Amino acid sequence: MVRNLKSAHLGEAGFGLGVILFGVFVAILTTNIPIGPAYSAVGPKVFPWLISGALILIGILLLIEGLTTADPPERIEVDWRAILIIGLGLAAQLLLMKPAGFIIASTVLFVAVARAFGGKRWWLEIIVGVALSTVTQIGFTWGLGLQLPSGILGGLL
């Protein structure tokens, strides 16, 4: 039992170390992002720096927890059915993005995720998915000036 406890904690500590190293890797890549003279305080490096800092901080916390925790970790039961449904929803979204457009593809993904989490009312899931996807499409197109694929609904938006 002691051997399993040590290996479990070493695995957690190793994962924390891996997260730290990934954060450092992101920080190194962030230094190579070119910036033009038009940017003042907030430029293209701000969010990558925030992400790398968060990764390093979380990695340190995971490393400390892995090295100091005395109780064995509890086994989490994985819901493979939900993972499969979400994976199929992601694959469907990727396949439908160009021909059907962002709204339809994202609605399919929304319905798949809702089903994976136990949704029972498919019609409500479709309505909410269409509403969220439409607001996102409009926000990106009109608010940010970025074009998401419109697909078969191209004439409506």
Image (spheres, rainbow, N blue to C red):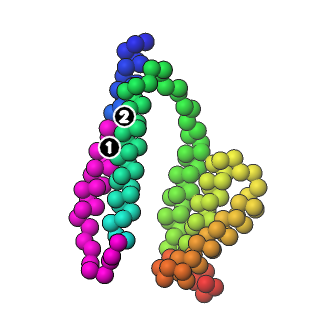
Residue 18 highlighted magenta (yes or no): yes
Amino acid type, residue under disc 1 in the picture: Ile
- Neighbour tally class for label 2: few under 14, some 14-19, many 20 plus, Cα within 10 Å: many
Amino acid type, residue under disc 2 in the picture: Leu
Residues shaded magenta: 16-41
- Neighbour tally class for label 1: few under 14, some 14-19, many 20 plus, Cα within 10 Å: many
| Residue 100, percent from left and from top | 56, 73
Residue 104 highlighted magenta (yes or no): no
Q: Which residue is mark 1?
A: 20
Disc number placed over residue 12 in the picture, else none? none
Q: Which residue is mark 2?
A: 63
| Residue 42, percent from left and from top | 37, 71
In percent of the image, x 29 and y 44: which residue is there? 21
Magenta: main secondary structure: helix
Q: Secondary structure at mark 2?
A: helix
Residue 133's place in the image compared with 72, above or below, is: below
Residue 83's place in the image compared with 146, above or below, is: above
Marks 1 and 2 close (CB-CB < 8 Å): yes
Q: Quadrant of the C terminus?
A: bottom right
Res 133 quadrant in image: bottom right
Whether residue 151 can be seen here: no
Q: Quadrant of the N terminus?
A: top left
Q: Secondary structure at mark 1?
A: helix
Res 29 quadrant in image: bottom left
| Residue 54, percent from left and from top | 40, 50
